[in-house]
Amino acid sequence: MRAIISDHLHLEGALLPILHALQNACGRIPQEATPLIADALNISKAEVHGVISFYHDFREVPAGRHVVKICRAEACQAVGGNALAEAALARLGVEWHGTTGNGAVTLEPVYCLGLCACGPAAMVDGKVHGRVDEVRMAKLLAEAGA
């Protein structure tokens, strides 16, 4: 962790690049990284924790092998996004940000994928899918091993 932190100290606004690098390397932001980052950047541990908890993409626990995000913005909700989300949560048996028992899928809400004309929208491992209904979501989840 110290090497990752020191590799980014020369950057202006180094906190976010450090957090991204740690998450890429560890699959999460290890709790023990917070005091190391705070010390290196001469900021408080509360400030580091505040940034980690503000941005939904930073995790303190590892994600599943596949990350499925369902758009929760108004445009997707207007065309069935709520029903799609409820069906996915029920099918996986998890809450938002939860991971299936087999570690295959983590389900997360996202607030706009930029596919407002093609809602409801979802993203699986960074690939966006438009006009996702319950049948298509079930297929995507099955492909992900859920």
Image (cartoon, rainbow, N blue to C red):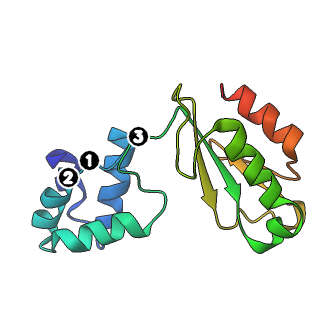
Residue at (34% x, 40% y) in the render: 25
The numbered mark, 1 or 3, whose residue comes first in the sequence reads 1
Which numbered tag is attached to residue 30? Answer: 1
Residue behind mark 3: 62
Quarter of the figure that contains the N terminus: top left
Instruction: Mark yes or no: residue 57 visible.
Output: yes
Q: Are marks 1 and 2 in contact (CB under 8 Å)?
A: yes
**Residue type at tag 3:** Pro
Query: How far apart are the alpha carbons under marks 3 and 2?
Result: 15 Å
10 Å neighbourhood of mark 3: few (<14), some, or many (≥20)?
some
Residue at (62% x, 41% y) in the render: 125
Residue 73 image point, x, y percent? 73, 70
Q: Are marks 3 and 2 in contact (CB under 8 Å)?
A: no
Please tell me in which quadrant of the rendered image residue 109 appears.
bottom right
Residue at (65% x, 67% y) in the render: 111
Quarter of the figure that contains the C terminus: top right
Please tell me in which quadrant of the rendered image residue 9 appears.
bottom left
- Residue depth check, mark 3 versus mark 2: number of the one nearer the observer: 3
